[in-house]
Image: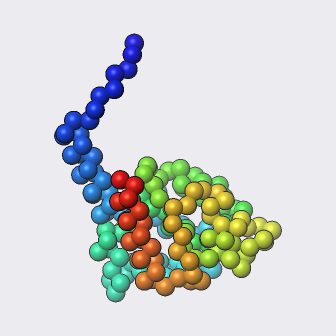
Amino acid sequence: MQEVETKPSGVTRWLQSLRNWARKRSLWLLHMNTGSCNGCDIEILAALTSRLDAERFGVKLVGSPRHADIMMCTGAVTLTMVDALRKTYEQIPEPKFVVVVGSCGSTGGVYKGGYNTFDGVDKIIPVDLYIPGCPPKPEAIIMGVAKLIEKMEEER
């Protein structure tokens, strides 16, 4: 039996555009520490406070990977965190995005070449956006999320 390709109807296209619009304005964030010194972790939480209000972009911190759209990783990946990082990444539903915060997660930072670390998160899972700094300021983290939203609009 041959498969027949059908073009999406107007209603289907409308529902897809509505879903994409809602997804860009309701990004749920999972924060994962893969072996950092907690400097970047503190700055991520500072970006989510009411002072800087990252929720204006629809960013909300969640505790389960099954609810997340974005996984925000900090720190050089230690050998004990490799399996946990992969399993957590696999549990996030599609479309998923990975943001690396800080120089340790990007290149290994001061832990680069260590016997128990990898030189960046991208050696384990694909990364969509890097936010450099040691640690980056909360304003830079918010700007990175805004850049990710722009990237999502371009891919649409």
x%, y% of residue 11?
19, 40
| Rendering quarter of residue 107 | bottom right
Q: Most extreme residue toward the right, as rendered?
A: 115
- Residue 2: x percent and y percent? 39, 16
Residue 137 in sight in this render:
yes
| Residue at x-position 35% and y-position 69% | 59
Q: Residue at x 41, y 70 (%)?
A: 147
Above/below status of 5 relative to 113? above
Residue 28 appears in view: no
| Residue 52 image offset from top left, x and y in percent | 35, 84
122 or 153: nearer the viewer:
153
On the rendered structure, is 65 left or right of 23?
right
Residue at image position (41%, 77%) is 142
Q: Position of residue 135 (x, y in %)?
A: 56, 83
On the rendered image, what quadrant is the N terminus found in?
A: top left
Residue at 27%, 57% in the rendered image: 21
Image quarter for residue 37? bottom right
